Image (spheres, coloured by chain):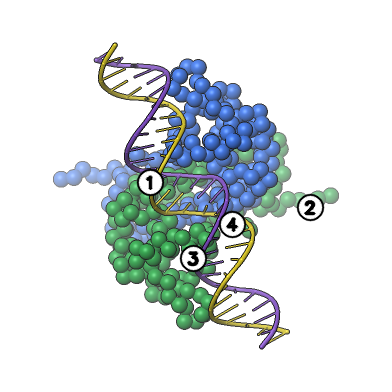
Chain colours: A green, B blue, C yellow, D purple
Amino acid sequence: MSPPAAPSDASPRREPAAEADWFEVANRLFFRLYQCSNLLHKNGTRHMGDFGATTQQWAVLGALARPLVATKGMSVKDLIEFLLLSRQNLTAVLDRLEARAWVERVKDPEDGRSRLIRLTEDGNRTWQAMRGPIEAFYNQALSPLTEAEQVVLVQLLDRLKGGLNVV
Amino acid sequence: MSPPAAPSDASPRREPAAEADWFEVANRLFFRLYQCSNLLHKNGTRHMGDFGATTQQWAVLGALARPLVATKGMSVKDLIEFLLLSRQNLTAVLDRLEARAWVERVKDPEDGRSRLIRLTEDGNRTWQAMRGPIEAFYNQALSPLTEAEQVVLVQLLDRLKGGLNVV
DNA sequence: AAATATATATCAATATATTGATATAAGCAA
DNA sequence: TTGCTTATATCAATATATTGATATATATTT
């Protein structure tokens, strides 16, 4: 009666034994993601010790420092979609970054409702200085993976993000 | 003067161009991890809506529900090493779980200093009831990946965890 | 027995994170 | 112009998350 399941069906049919095996794999996958996330924030923030910056602040600065963004800035709306966190949360992070004079909020000349978040000169200097510790952190964290494996991991995380991002 | 770099050296030598390429890959990898983590907590907690449980509470219940743990329980120390979060944070999560009567703290008969955290009957019933929504969440999130790719992703995350977990 | 180490807990400060409700200003459309 | 939508901000409640300092009880070692 029901149509055959497509390969990307959200609930594929499996034999009971295969279902149990699959669940073990899925459960382990998300638990590893949970553990990696805990370690990323804990040890990433530790590596930023000299700057007193957190991984979230690092993520915002990194988003704003991208070549196509640095001069124009980014709206709060776009930052939310890029970083995937709530507006109220991002506002608080931006408040702290603004208090340290690393970012500034300027009116968008093309839309009076919108405000563009931009790196200040000081923020850009700080971001450049952070690159060294960030690279050291990346090198240490990725040391168990070959460069080819790193590329595969990026691709798989990309697809996982797509599956997680269903609203 | 310096010894040749081993393959797993934390700071491998690279040509400048390769270094820049590698940094782009590494940067994207950790940003995808950051995004997946944000989505895991946001949408995972949403899927637990009927229970009012968060992903952290889900992680604790899942750790305590494992076959070899369910009868004996787990010490706070072991839970910390398993979940990779701070003692003060875990204490607060356990307080909330205990207030809902999903877990209990019992004295360890083998070590008077230690207290074993155990699922209550109610906690176990809740965990079993959560399995359905969790499986639905896993199915949706993993729908862009084949089962073979899921296995590869687990292995790569495992290794990444090892690199991140250097103290 | 005394000193040391371990296991847990607690208190405080700070920074994320979510949802929900409300407010304000500006763009746009009927 | 009136009304609808969009973009941002703010306030509140709750739950994570970290570090650091302190306290208590038990175990182990000297």
Mark 4: amino acid:
Asn
- Chain to which mark 4 belongs: A
Quarter where residue B97 is shown? top right
Q: Which tag is nearer the camera, tag 2 or tag 3? A: 3
Q: Which residue is mark 1?
A: A43
Disc 1/disc 3 C-alpha distance (Å): 24 Å
Mark 1: amino acid:
Asn
Q: Which residue is mark 2?
A: A3
Which structural element holds mark 4? loop
Report whether mark 1 lies on the same chain as mark 2: yes
Disc 4/disc 2 C-alpha distance (Å): 26 Å
Q: Which residue is mark 3?
A: A79
Which structural element holds mark 1? helix
Mark 2: amino acid:
Pro
Q: Is residue D5 left or right of residue B14?
A: right
Which structural element holds mark 3? helix
**Residue at the location (35% across, 47% down)?**
A46
**Vertical relation: A100 (above or below) B39:** below
Q: Are marks 4 and 2 in contact (CB under 8 Å)?
A: no
Report whether mark 1 lies on the same chain as mark 3: yes
Q: Which residue is mark 4?
A: A165
